[in-house]
Amino acid sequence: MNEVWVFNGEGSTFPAGVFASKEDAEAWIKTNKLSGCLTKYPVGVSVYDWAIAEGYWAPKQEHHREPKFIQRFSSAQLEHYHYEAGE
């Protein structure tokens, strides 16, 4: 498996579900009328390292290499979808 789909419910700090396929995730979201964001994440690599390797982003300042920055890093380049009440 090279990727997983992670659903974060609206206002949630932690993921509510992790799925092997987008179709399974969307079925669950629709059945439960959920609101939030479904994002495709690479497996075996951090988003920080992935974004650098794919050429989407590069650290430019010293604090970009610090743990506090890396542990909170996300990328809008990750494939993602927003849902409201399951739609």
Image (tube, helix red, strand yellow):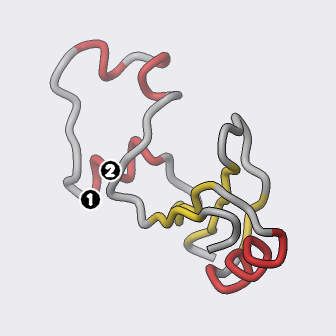
The answer to whether residue 18 is above or below residue 31 is above
Residues under numbered marks 1 and 2 in contact, where contact means CB atoms less than 8 Å apart: yes
x and y, in percent, of residue 61 in the image: 19, 18
Residue farthest to the right?
Answer: 32
Q: Secondary structure at mark 2?
A: helix
Near mark 2 (Cα within 10 A), the count class, few <14, some 14-19 or many ≥20, is some
Q: Nearer the viewer, residue 69 or 76?
A: 76
Residue farthest to the bottom?
Answer: 23
**In the displayed structure image, the side of residue 26 where residue 43 appears, left or right:** left
Q: Amino acid at mark 1?
A: Glu
Residue at position x 30%, y 13% from top?
63
Circle 1 is placed at which residue position? Answer: 54
Residue farthest to the front?
Answer: 85
Quadrant including the N terminus = bottom right
Circle 2 is placed at which residue position? Answer: 51
x and y, in percent, of residue 81 in the image: 49, 66
Q: Nearer the viewer, residue 26 or 72?
A: 26
Find residue 27 and report its image quarter: bottom right
**In the displayed structure image, the side of residue 15 where residue 32 appears, left or right:** right
* Label ID, residue 12: none
Q: Secondary structure at mark 1?
A: loop
Q: Amino acid at mark 2?
A: Ala
**In the displayed structure image, the side of residue 21 where residue 80 appears, left or right:** left
Quadrant including the C terminus = bottom right
Find residue 59 and report its image quarter: top left
